[in-house]
Amino acid sequence: MSETPNFPYYNTLDQIYHAEWSTAKLARLELLRHSIRTLWPKGHPTKLIHVAGTGGKGSTCRFLEMGLGAVGKAGAFMSPHLFDYRERFSVDGRFVSQDDINEVWQRRIQPHCVNLVLHNTAHAHTFHEVSILIALALFELHGVAWAALETGVGGRYDQTRALPVVATVLTNVGSDHAHLLGRQLWQRVLDKAGIARPGVPFFSSESNPDSRAIIAQVCQEVAAPLTWVDAQAVAELDALLDAAGLLPLPGESLLNAHYQRWNAALSLAVIRFFCPGLEPATILARFGEARLPGRFWQVEEGIYADIAHNVEKVRALVDEVQTRFVGKGKIMVVGLSGPRAPTEVLGSLATIAKAIIVTGASYKGQDPNGVRNAIEALAGETPTLLINDPRQALQVAKSMRSADDIILLTGSTYMIEQVLNPDPYLRYLHTTYGWRDHQDQTASGEVRLTLPRTRTAPL
C-alpha cells in the first residue's frame, strides 16, 4: 500500500459510493454547459476567473475586479447579496442597475430557460444556475473583458464549475458547510480544490500544510500550474502600499482590515501573472478603492455591520475589532442561519462583548432562544438578551450604548439585511423567499411538478 494518500482516488471512490448523488450533480454542470453553448455558440467573450474558499471569496473577486480594471473593463459575480439581488453583479466596482437585470432576464435568459423546460421539465434551471447565466449576459452587455466569479458552496460540484475559465483561485478551507462538503477537513479541501481545470493556472493562499498537500495532488492530477501565496507575500504587499504612499487608507477601504490583506495579496499574484507589465502601485491604488457592503461596514457613527457567519470569519472579525476599538465597549447584535453550532461560530464574540443581543434571521434562521441558551454559558457575566425582531434588537442596542461603546451586527447576512435594508418590498421578498415552492397545488387544484431545490440561498 502506498505511504502517500491518493486523494484523487479518494474522490473517485466518493463519487462511486454516492453515484446517484454525484452523477446528478455532474449532470447539472453539463446542463449549464449546454445553456452556455446555446446562448454563446462562439464562446463567451469575457476572460473568467473562478474563486472558491471558505472565507474571502467576495473580497477577492472585488480586488480582482478593481485591479484588472486597470487593463480593461472588469466585473464580478458574488454572493450572497445584502440588500438587493443586483449586488451580485458589478462592473468596474459598481453594482449593475435594476433595469439591467430586467433586460437580460426578460430578453435573454428567461426565454432560454422556458425553452429548456418545454423539452424536459427536469431541465428547469435553479436559482444559482439562472444567476450565473444572468452574470454572463450582463458581462456581455457591458463589454466586460475580465470577470471574477465566486462559487456558491464548495467547488467541485458547484454550478460555477461549468464555466470555462482562465484561472482558478482558492482562498482557504475551513469548517463551514461540513454537512454538505464532508465532516473531515480533507473532504472539504478535496471538494474546493476540485475547481482545478486541466492546464489552467491555480492560485491559493491556504496555509495549512496538510491542506496544501491535497491541493497540490489535485493540481498535479490535472496538470494545473500551482502558485502559493503566503505570509511573505502579504508582508511584501504591506511594504508596497507604504512605498507607494497609499497609507493610511480611507476608513471604508477593504484593505484596512488585516485579514483582507491576504485576499489582496492573492489577487495581486493573479493579476501580475496575466499582466506582468502593470505596475504594482497602480494595482494597489485600485485595491485601495475596493468597497463591499457588509464587510466591516460603518453604518453610522459607532455602529458597524459585518456579514461574518462562520467560525473563521467571526474569529478574523474579533481580531479586527480588538485592534480597532481598544478600550471601547462592544455591544453585539447577533443572529445565526443554517446548521451551524452557535458556540463554535459566536463563541469568540462572547470573549470581547460588553453585552450580546440575540435576534432572528429571515432565511434558514436558527431559533434565537436556542442560540441564546447555547452561548449564555460562554458569556459568563456578560448580559445576554433575547430580542426576536432584528430591527427592534438594534434599537435596544442603541438604548444600552454609552459614549464609549460601539455596536456590531454580525453572524447572519439575513439578519443584517432585515435590520438595515431601506426597501420594505425587498425585505418582504427576502423573508418570504421560496413560498411558491411550498404550494403543492395550482389555483385549479391540479398537482404541479415540484423540482428538487438545489440552488443556493437568495441573499
Image (cartoon, rainbow, N blue to C red):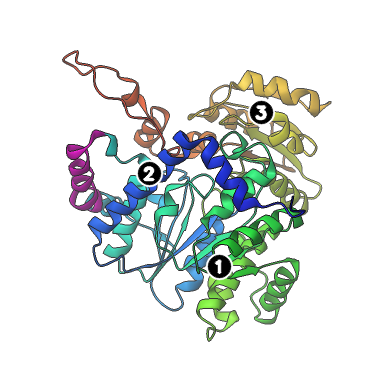
Residue found at x 43% / y 41%: 23
Dot 2 alpha-carbon crowd within 10 angstroms: few under 14, some 14 to 19, many 20 or more? few
Residue found at x 35% / y 21%: 438
Q: Which residue does the numbered mark 3 point to in the structure image?
A: 357
Q: Label 1's element? A: loop
Distance from Cα at disc 2 to Cα at disc 1: 24 Å
Residue found at x 40% / y 54%: 162
What amino acid does circle 2 point to? Ala
Task: Decide if residue 380 is on the left or right side of residue 207.
Answer: right
In the rendered structure, find residue 27 and report the number of the disc placed on it.
Answer: 2
Name the residue nearer the viewer: 425 or 173: 173
Q: Label 3's element? A: strand
* Residue 338 magenta-highlighted: no
Question: Residue 375, image x and y in percent?
Answer: 73, 26
What amino acid does circle 1 point to? Ala
Span shown in magenta: 104-121
Dot 3 alpha-carbon crowd within 10 angstroms: few under 14, some 14 to 19, many 20 or more? many
The earlier-in-sequence mark between 3 and 2 is 2
Question: Residue 178, image x and y in percent?
Answer: 62, 37
Mark 3 or 1: the one toward you: 1
Residue 54 visible to an observer of this rendering: no
Q: Which residue does the numbered mark 1 point to in the structure image?
A: 223
